[in-house]
């Protein structure tokens, strides 16, 4: 069932990939390798491509008008190759509307690499998809200053225990927008953990330049329902406000546990009591403003 004609959605986190691309490597969904967090579930993602055309066909009936692509090619020799490929997809289909690519901000060539990304008109931000305690690394902070220099958006995946570090980074560069991926990556669905997660989100929300991206809630809750994700969605909006929340599907990763329609319908059900202007902001307006699309 398609969504009503008055619903417009800018999906703020999607991934496209071509498993046969000669230079792009998709390390998190190889058909013969386990994902470092999600395990063997992601193997089937790598058994076929998911191109811009596939996304348009899937999402158009559900109100999609724009989408932000976040780095999918993990482990490629040259991250700019993905930006080049995605710009070609945009020029061909109109999607993605914006590109958030990868650069190792600790690398000595980060400056040059970002300038090469910027040769492509749809490039808007950087995701440094690092692991471990990297947010306080002097090399990372030095590279992070480039995001500010080039007026880009920072995409950061951080869990509860790291929210204080994200807050410090946000304060250090108050004019750089940080998009906190996947609602702060809540890992459990227990009452005790919920309070811990909420505390971390309340802390990082003190920085007005941090945006909460509500997405990817199926990753730690594979059998999710409207009721199981509702507290997380509503708390994000309560803490950050409708002016600092954006919605996304994390597609096709979350296709492992639901349909695209299920995700959109659930978001709409949970937010139905918000005003028209609040819903417009969270589902499309904020994303348009943040990524200039």
Image: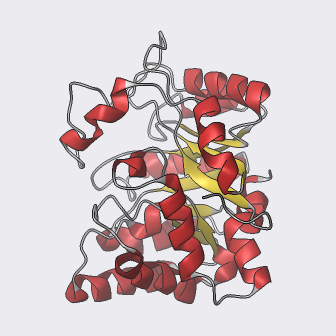
- Image spot of residue 145 (x, y percent): 60, 51
Q: Is residue 120 visible?
A: no
Q: Is residue 272 left or right of residue 18?
A: right
Q: Position of residue 111 (x, y in %)?
A: 61, 33
Furthest residue toward front: 1
- The residue located at (69%, 26%) in the rendering is 89
Q: Residue 47 location in percent, x, y?
A: 34, 25
Location of residue 93 by image quarter: top right
97 over 141 or under it: above or below: above
Task: Check the image and report above or below for 243 versus 17.
Answer: below
Task: Answer with the quarter of the image where residue 183 lies.
Answer: bottom left
Residue located 77% across and 58% down the image: 288
Q: Is residue 43 left or right of residue 5?
A: left
Does residue 151 appear left or right of residue 106 in this picture?
A: right
Viewer-proximal residue among 242 and 254: 254
Give the camera-side residue of 127 and 212. Answer: 212
Q: Residue at x 30, y 89 (%)?
A: 195
Residue plotted at (78% across, 62% down): 289
Q: How is the image coloured?
A: secondary structure
Q: Can residue 68 be seen here?
A: yes
Q: Is residue 97 left or right of residue 188?
A: right
How many labels, in total? 0
Residue 8 picture location, percent across and down: 75, 62
Q: Nearer the viewer, residue 250 or 192?
A: 250
Q: Is residue 203 above or below residue 56?
A: below
Q: Which of these two is toward me, 293 or 155?
A: 293
Q: Where, by quadrant of the figure, is residue 208 drawn?
A: bottom right
- Which quadrant, please, contains the N terminus? bottom right
């Amino acid at each position: 069932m398609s969504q009503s004609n008055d619903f417009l959605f800018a999906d703020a986190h999607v991934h496209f990939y071509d498993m046969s691309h000669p230079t792009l490597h998709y390390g998190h969904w190889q058909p013969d390798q386990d994902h470092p967090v999600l395990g063997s579930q992601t193997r089937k993602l790598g058994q076929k491509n998911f191109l811009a055309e596939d996304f348009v066909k899937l999402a158009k009936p559900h109100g999609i008008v724009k989408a932000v692509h976040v780095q999918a090619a993990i482990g490629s020799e040259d991250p700019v190759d993905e930006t080049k490929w995605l710009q070609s997809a945009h020029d061909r289909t109109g999607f993605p509307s914006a590109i958030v690519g990868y650069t190792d901000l600790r690398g000595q060539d980060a400056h040059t690499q970002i300038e090469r990304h910027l040769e492509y008109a749809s490039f808007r931000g950087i995701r440094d998809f690092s692991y471990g305690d990297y947010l306080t690394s002097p090399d990372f902070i030095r590279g992070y200053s480039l995001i500010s220099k080039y007026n880009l958006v920072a995409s950061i995946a951080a869990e509860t225990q790291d929210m204080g570090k994200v807050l410090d980074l946000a304060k250090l560069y108050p004019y750089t927008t940080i998009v906190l991926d996947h609602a702060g990556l809540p890992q459990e669905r227990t009452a005790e953990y919920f309070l811990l997660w909420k505390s971390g989100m309340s802390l990082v929300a003190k920085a007005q330049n941090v945006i909460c991206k509500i997405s990817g809630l199926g990753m730690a809750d594979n059998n999710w329902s409207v009721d199981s994700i509702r507290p997380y969605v509503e708390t994000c909006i309560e803490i950050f406000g409708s002016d600092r929340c954006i919605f996304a599907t994390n597609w096709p990763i979350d296709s492992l546990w639901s349909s695209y329609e299920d995700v959109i319908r659930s978001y709409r059900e949970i937010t139905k009591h918000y005003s028209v202007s609040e819903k417009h902001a969270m589902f499309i307006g904020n994303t348009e403003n943040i990524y200039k699309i």
